[in-house]
Image (cartoon, helix red, strand yellow):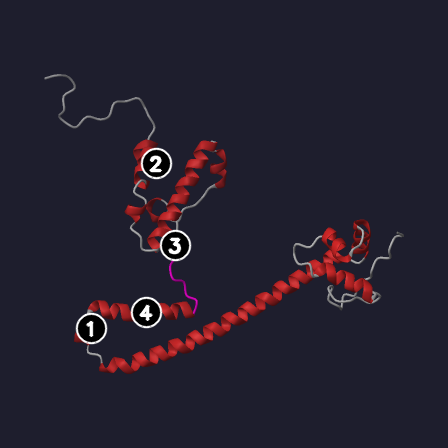
Amino acid sequence: MSTLKTLQMDPTIDPWERQPGETSARYAQFCAYRDLGRTRTLRKAATTLTRADAWVRQVAAANWWRDRAEAYDRHLDKLYEQAWVEERRKAAEADAKILGAAVGKLAQRLPSLRADQLSPGDTIRLMDVVMRHRRVLFGDPQATIAVTGPGGDPLSVRLADFEELAPQERRRRLSELAAAVARRVSAADGDDDEAVYPAWEKEEATTGDSPAADAPDTGAEPARPAGEGVGPA
């Protein structure tokens, strides 16, 4: 098979559409390859077109099949994203109407409610349901999770210091950081921090993270309380 002339793409036409100078037969062959989906291969196209692999590779290269098919995939992704955004917008509008109707009914009911007939728990639950759904509707965050270090300050990771650590020490530090994040997530979910991670404080005590463990060993004996004798009485 002689060398094929490279197809000249028109920048004003979408790549996956038929290009000027492209015959209907060639475009149909490209469409067969394009419509194989994201798992498409030239070998699959050769099987579909009942053509030799070498012939398909040459035609595909001359007519930019791969580039055009990838552009088509990105086009479909964009359409899907736009459709999903529109569906979310419609759902948000429907939820807003439902919430508005519920708030209206509640507002009608409030004047007839007597404060002395509502328990503190009823009042809290009532306000929580309304405000929680309002926050969800307007996209406000439901919880804030922050990883903190000693003293409650934000935990900073010093890459230069981290790189100097031994591999075993790096794994220990990463394990501690992962456990800290897990504790924060558990706390945000309302779980009992101590019940879920009871070994955390024990690990800190045994891994040398306490101030006493960080103090240098000078070889001196610990200070004796005032008045305590040095030798036997």
Tell me the crowding category of disc 4: few under 14, some 14 to 19, or many 20 or more residues within 10 angstroms, Cα based. Answer: few
Q: Is residue 140 magenta?
A: yes
Q: Name the residue under label 4.
A: 129
Foreground tag (3 vs 1) = 1
The C terminus lies in quadrant:
top left
Q: What amino acid does circle 2 point to?
A: Asp
Q: Earlier in the sequence, mark 2 or mark 3?
A: 3
- Which residue is tagged 1? 118
* Residue identified by numbered label 2: 209
Disc 1/disc 2 C-alpha distance (Å): 50 Å
- Decide which of tag 1 and tag 2 comes sooner along the chain: 1
Which residue occupies 28% across, 22% down? 220
Q: How far apart are marks 4 and 2 (CA)?
A: 43 Å
Over which residues does the magenta segment extend? 138-145
Asked whether disc 1 touches disc 4, contact meaning CB atoms under 8 Å apart, the reply is: no
| Location of residue 111 with respect to 9 vertically, above or below | below
Q: In this view, does 227 lie above or below 148?
A: above
Q: Residue at x 44, y 36 (%)?
A: 171
Q: Position of residue 194 (x, y in %)?
A: 28, 46
Question: Tag 1, which secondary structure?
Answer: loop
- Is residue 159 inside the magenta stretch? no
Q: Nearer the viewer, residue 96 or 18?
A: 18
**Percent position (x, y) of residue 203?**
33, 37
Nearer the viewer's eye, disc 1 or disc 2?
A: 1
> Looking at the picture, which amino acid does disc 3 mark?
Ile
Residue type at mark 4 is Val
Q: Residue 36 carries which label?
A: none
Q: How far apart are marks 2 and 3 (CA)?
A: 23 Å
Local SS, label 2? loop
Residue pictured at 30% horizontal, 37% vertical:
202
**Which comes sooner in the sequence, label 4 or label 2?**
4
User: Horizontal placement of 1 versus 148: left or right?
Assistant: right
